Image (cartoon, helix red, strand yellow):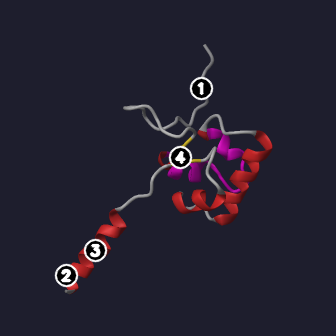
């Protein structure tokens, strides 16, 4: 009995949250999905988005109070700017896209 309980607990920790679309998610979803982003920072992300429009690149998140380069680097893989990346596409870049 103890082994099965331990196994179930270990499996629960292995499950990772789905990436979150920061251009659509509410503060609660952002906070729940991004390690190191609590309710206050998540609310600041939503407030920034409401004032300035959707995020065009991940680097723009550094404009939100409390989100620095170190935090952004840690959460970049769990953030999406659209609903779903194209098949085989790498996560959204930290660098702004260059115009052609």
Start and end of the magenta stretch? 59-76
In the drawing, what numbered circle is on residue 86? Answer: none
Which residue is labeled 3 in the image? 8
Q: Earlier in the sequence, mark 4 or mark 3?
A: 3
Instruction: Give the Cα distance between marks 4 and 3.
Output: 27 Å
Give above or below for 88 relative to 36.
above
Which residue is labeled 1 in the image? 97
Image quadrant assignment for residue 57: top right
- Label 1 residue SS: loop
Q: Earlier in the sequence, mark 2 or mark 4?
A: 2
**Residue 46 at x, y percent in the picture:** 70, 52
* Left or right, 5 with reference to 82: left
Q: Are marks 1 and 2 in contact (CB under 8 Å)?
A: no
Which residue is labeled 2 in the image? 3
**Residue 34 at x, y percent in the picture:** 54, 57
Q: Earlier in the sequence, mark 1 or mark 3?
A: 3
> In front of the other: label 1 or label 2?
2
The front one of 10 and 4 is: 4
Instruction: Give the Cα distance between marks 2 and 4.
Output: 35 Å
- Tell me what residue is drawn at x 34 percent, y 69 percent: 12
> In front of the other: label 1 or label 3?
3
- Tell me what residue is drawn at x 51 percent, y 36 percent: 92
Image quadrant assignment for residue 14: bottom left
Say if residue 35 shows up in the picture.
no
Say if residue 56 shows up in the picture.
yes
Which residue is labeled 4 in the image? 79
Q: Earlier in the sequence, mark 1 or mark 2?
A: 2
Residue at the top extreme of this rendering: 100
Instruction: Give the Cα distance between marks 2 and 3.
Output: 9 Å
């Amino acid at each position: 009995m103890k082994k099965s309980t331990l196994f179930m607990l270990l499996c629960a920790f292995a499950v990772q949250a789905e990436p979150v679309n920061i251009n659509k998610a509410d503060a609660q979803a952002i906070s729940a999905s991004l390690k190191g982003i609590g309710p206050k920072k998540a609310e600041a992300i939503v407030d920034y988005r409401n004032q300035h429009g959707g995020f065009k690149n991940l680097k723009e998140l550094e404009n939100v109070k409390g989100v620095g380069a170190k935090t952004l680097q840690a959460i970049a893989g769990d953030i999406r700017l659209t609903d779903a990346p194209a098949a085989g596409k790498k996560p959204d870049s930290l660098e702004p896209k260059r115009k052609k």
